[in-house]
Amino acid sequence: MSSVSSTSHVILGMLAQHPRSGYDIKQYVDKSTRHFWAASYGQIYPDLKRLAEAGLVEGQSTPSGGRQRTVFSITDEGRAVLYEWLTSPAEPLEEVRDEALLKIFFADLLRLEETIALLHIKRATHQRTLDQLEGQVQGAEAQRAAQGLRPMPMPLDYGIGFHRWAVAWCDETEALLRSEASQEQLQPKRA
Amino acid sequence: MSSVSSTSHVILGMLAQHPRSGYDIKQYVDKSTRHFWAASYGQIYPDLKRLAEAGLVEGQSTPSGGRQRTVFSITDEGRAVLYEWLTSPAEPLEEVRDEALLKIFFADLLRLEETIALLHIKRATHQRTLDQLEGQVQGAEAQRAAQGLRPMPMPLDYGIGFHRWAVAWCDETEALLRSEASQEQLQPKRA
DNA sequence: ATCTTCATGTAATAAGTTACATGATTAA
DNA sequence: TTAATCATGTAACTTATTACATGAAGAT
């Protein structure tokens, strides 16, 4: 019925900034919302078509040479739907799938060094994301200098803070595990 | 081909601790891994059947009265598959869908008070989860006192730390937003 | 009596990924 | 000329949720 999936809101929000092609949307998603809301071409193009049918966006064909390109703009109705979503008090969806943490959950089945290896893997993924987000800050700074001083996007700040925290957690947990292990050697399990 | 989905690993891991019914697994998932790896009956029961066909688990019918109940145990082959997964160096899956953060990403379209409302919503969901996790610690403490002093499960510690951090981020971001807003009033946007 | 929990399962649907196909333009 | 990027799209598949159906046992 509603024709507006959660991912449609990403599209509407991005088109509210300025018109874009499906390809543009995908590029932008990959460099901005990816870490908290990803989207693939297989979603974006069909979604765009549905949104156009529902009158929430409008496509305009703007080929350059023999290369086709359809730029979509948001309509007034689209803006209304977007605003309604943004201000809706409904419980926002929050889902996490963290395979590394799931493995750590079963650490009882592993030896100390294997568990620590899991912590290292988790740490590395957070560190990699962190590096990437910190790279984005450079780009944001450049823009900030150019146009009217926009502060760093809040979700970027959130991401950096979170992944820093996660890296620290991995380190602290490893240290804790090692100290527990050496304690146990002095004072073995009682019967 | 492989018959072992990511969610199958949850099942295998839980059965590695001790035999359980599909119902038991669902209860346990809901009170333990839910926040980083959820699973529904619609996954668990068909998965259990597939795992049994693949010889990784074995079901034993243990009705009590007229109430049917099938308890599954992990086989040696199942243990091998589980161990292989736990120690595999493959990039672990990590996915997040955070609708509140997505809305905050589009805060440019909103007024200050509407943006702050988004922060409040996000804060409330983290606080609620935090309360729930801290409740779990009580249960863990009880168990710890009973059997041989197992420390708090690492993912529980992780969850508590993360949601505390997230609540603090919401508070700090709100404060920042408010101070920026009052600054702007003294020193309005230039042309 | 009636509600909750125990217990198992499926059908319909939704959501999303991956891989593929196609082809033009631009930079090396 | 070759590779990368721009650009659009679909088909097959996987994954998972939701809602429903069924019914026994235990608690109020």
Image (tube, coloured by chain):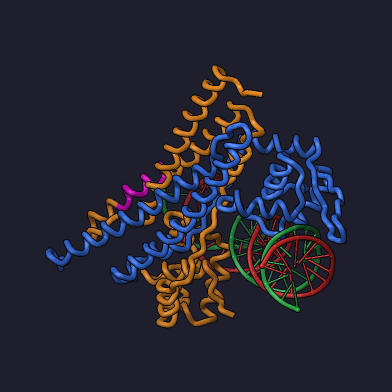
Chain colours: A orange, B blue, C green, D red
Q: Where is residue A127 in the image (x, y as percent from the top left)?
A: 44, 39
Q: Where is residue B135 in the image (x, y as percent from the top left)?
A: 52, 51
Q: Please give the count of numbered marks on the rendered protein.
A: 0
Residue A133 falls inside the magenta stretch: yes
Q: A41 or B187, which is in the foreground?
A: B187
**Residue beneath the point at 30% across and 71% down:** B111
**Residue beneath the point at 35% across and 52% down:** B168
Residue A123 falls inside the magenta stretch: no
| Residue A73 shows in this picture | no
> Which quarter of the rendering shows the N terminus of chain A?
bottom right
Q: C11 or D8, which is in the foreground?
A: C11
Q: Where is residue A74 in the image (x, y as percent from the top left)?
A: 42, 76
| Residue A119 shows in this picture | yes
Relative to A110, does residue B185 appear above or below in the rendering? below
**Residue beneath the point at 44% across and 51% down:** B163
Q: Position of residue A4 (x, y in %)?
A: 53, 74
Q: Residues in magenta?
A: A131-140
